[in-house]
Image (cartoon, rainbow, N blue to C red):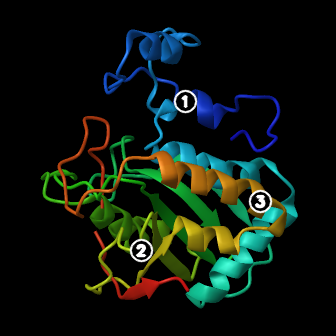
Amino acid sequence: MDGGVVPWPPPEIVQKLYASDRWRGKTEEDGRAVRERLGYYCDLQSLNSEDAITWSFLGPLVYGPAAWREHLATTLFIRLGFPKPRVVAIWLWRRIPHPEKCTSNGGPEIDFGIQSEAAVVLGEAKWNSDLAIGQGVGRNRSQFDLRAAYCGGFGPKALPEIRHWAVLGVGRGTDVLDCASASLGVAVHNCSWAQLLALMPSALHGELGAYLAWKDKYSSRRPNKRLKPPAADERDGGRSMAPGGEVT
């Protein structure tokens, strides 16, 4: 889904158009079709792509009317117990300073961020994959560990006006993040893509609802939840460090 964004493709999509060796097509015709445009297969072409659904939901808000961003932030923040936002920024796939090594420019890539004058929500988007482990300087952290550590450490130093921090897991179910442990005053919550859809501007419900139903119908079934080692380009990552729960 391009969400009516012009010109197309925007920088967020262009940066994701790298080649992948994970194509598992069944026929030579399939292989030719997926390589026709770029000359190679890209993971954004996969039904299982979490980047594709992240863009489809939030890309139109990044480039669309300010009222759309304000609507999502307001409905979400109410459920998180955060103050109603006066100004809102939404961004995709930006890197933050590494919370264990401030000299590194290769910190965690955040799937999406929602920021107001008083609150920051860092989003971790999943579809079929689980939270990656083996990250951080000692390779002993999960994706969530470093995100929560940033929210409780470097983040408040860089953004001292922010009083409310949260990490939000969005997936096919509501089990992306472990909300059991508590530390550093960082809120931890989960929601499904269907629940996130309910928080979106009504103008997007029809198209996003149809897309979500199509993706869910034709994607492979999600395996049993497990922690997994990171892919080569995912070794940055974080785990839940504060109480939270499902966004309802």
Amino acid type shown at disc 3: Gly
Query: In the drawing, does residue 230 fall left or right of residue 2?
Result: left
Query: In the drawing, does residue 169 fall left or right of residue 143?
Result: right
Identify the residue shown where x is 79% and y is 68%.
Answer: 201
Identify the residue shown where x is 64% and y is 51%.
Answer: 211
Residue at label 3? 206
Q: Is residue 31 above or below residue 200?
A: above
Binning the other alpha carbons within 10 Å of mark 3 as few (below 14), some (14 to 19) or many (20 upward) gives: few
The C terminus appears in which quarter of the rendering?
bottom right
Q: Position of residue 110 (x, y in %)?
A: 47, 53
Amino acid type shown at disc 2: Thr
- CB under 8 Å between callouts 3 and 2? no
Identify the residue shown where x is 35% and y is 73%.
Answer: 175
Indicate which disc residue 174 carries: 2
Binning the other alpha carbons within 10 Å of mark 1 as few (below 14), some (14 to 19) or many (20 upward) gives: few
- CB under 8 Å between callouts 1 and 2? no
Identify the residue shown where x is 59% and y is 91%.
Answer: 81
3D distance between C-alphas at marks 1 and 3: 28 Å
Q: Position of residue 29 (x, y in %)?
A: 46, 11
Secondary element at tag 2: loop
The N terminus appears in which quarter of the rendering?
top right
Residue at label 1? 15
Q: Position of residue 161 (x, y in %)?
A: 62, 76
- CB under 8 Å between callouts 1 and 3? no
Residue 159 can be seen, yes or no: no
